[in-house]
Image (cartoon, helix red, strand yellow):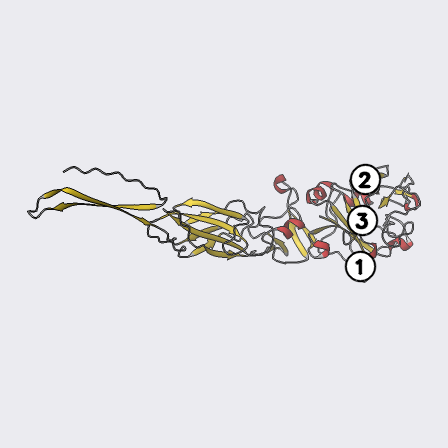
Amino acid sequence: MRLSFKIIVTAVAAFVFLNLGCNKNPLGDDSQDSSFSPGTSFDTQAPTAPASIVLSGVASTTMTPTATWGDSTDDSGVTGYEVALGTSQGGEEVQPYSDLGITNSYQFSSLSPALTTATAFFISVRAKDEAGNIGEAVSASFYSPGLATSNGAFQYPDTTFAVSCLEYLNSISYNSEGDGLYWLDPDGAGGNSELKAHCDMTRDGGGWTLFSNRRIHGSNIESCQTGLNSFFQNACGSPDLITSADSYSLGNTSVRENILSSGEWLFVQFDGSDVEDSDDAFIIHHGSDLFFTSTGVLNRTAVTKVCDINNSNCDSAGVEFLWAGDGYFSSARCNTGYSPAGVTYFGNYGYCHNGNANYNANSLFGNRDQYVETKLWGHPSGGGAYYERIFLR
């Protein structure tokens, strides 16, 4: 007996069954006539969802969570699993579904740039089969684990530190801890020790690092250092003590520039009862240090713009920041030159705009008349009747 046949399969993802048989004649002998009946069966059934999903490793600033799940089942056989990361069950807007092959676990790598809000994230896993069917996903969520504390200040749960208050605010670990003391490592791997700083996480978008608290004093001098040059280039006081009676400086130019990521400087004044003079507060936009070492000169630094405390009502036309580290500029006028320290005045600063000599320094917001509210080191009377905090982010 000789059989010959031709099979043509035109369907994709079909399973072909050959039904081959030979007819018997009444004597039981094989007949020369044989029959062949091909058949097809299509797999349209998707795999079941993975049995379960368990997460580990989520309480870490490196954000390398591991997902582990149970097997899916399928008639034609599971050929692999896909995993995704999103902000909803089955979502994939953070990391789209990717094929893992046959495995029951997966560890995400280096997700901290993508996970920037204290919200819920979902890891989702689904199976696929030989026929290309994709099953329903099973999801598990994780939230910001919150910051840890050490010696009275916040830090990351894995005992590392952020460069700035703004980094903490934007990290997955931040969970509305609010204003207070935080450990910072401004130079990262640069080798300098971490430092404790005061972070304002609620004012005007939050993420502000306090680098200066200048006290109320009849002559505008501070309790440490001998002038503004040394005050702004050396650590002074403690971030725990920032009342109207306290002098505090975070550190020097390199510390400030490492912290400064958004290029914003916030100047806020308070009276002796801690009441904020918000109409005189302003934000300067400038991407490098404004209080570098200054000797024997009035430095005029062109800045991008100056805005009110809500970052609105901005002036970007010819705005300059004036800074004399060891002297002053007369009457706080924009276009007057540098005057040496002599025996009394040791540093002054403020901003001017449009290069107009008729404007007092800092005149865009509030009532700023001559020396008042410029905090000229060594100037008595009205200029010392408030205290000032300067933040950056």
Instruction: Find residue 66 and report its horizontal and vertical position in percent.
Output: 47, 50
Disc ID at residue 302: 2
In the image, taking residue 29 as reference, residue 110 lies left or right, namely right
Question: Closer to us: mark 2 or mark 3?
Answer: 3
Describe the element under mark 2 as helix, strand or loop.
strand
- Judging by the rendered image, the residue that carries numbered circle 1 is 276
CB under 8 Å between callouts 1 and 2? Answer: no
Dot 3 amino acid type: Cys
Rounded to the nearest angstrom, the CA distance separating label 1 from label 2 is: 28 Å
Describe the element under mark 3 as helix, strand or loop.
loop
Dot 2 amino acid type: Ala
Q: Does label 2 or label 3 sit earlier along the sequence?
A: 2
In the image, taking residue 166 as reference, residue 328 lies left or right, namely right
Q: Does label 1 or label 3 sit earlier along the sequence?
A: 1
Describe the element under mark 1 as helix, strand or loop.
loop
Disc ID at residue 355: none
Q: Residue at 49% of width from left, 49% of height from top?
A: 84
CB under 8 Å between callouts 1 and 3? Answer: no
Instruction: Find residue 341 and report its horizontal and vertical position in percent.
Output: 89, 41
Above or below, 43 against 253 in this view is below
Question: Closer to us: mark 1 or mark 2?
Answer: 2
Q: How many marks?
A: 3
In the image, taking residue 380 as reference, residue 89 lies left or right, namely left
- Judging by the rendered image, the residue that carries numbered circle 3 is 314
Rounded to the nearest angstrom, the CA distance separating label 2 from label 3 is: 15 Å
Q: Residues within 10 Å of mark 3 (few under 14, many from 20)?
A: some
Q: Nearer the viewer, residue 186 or 316?
A: 316
Q: Residues within 10 Å of mark 1 (few under 14, many from 20)?
A: some
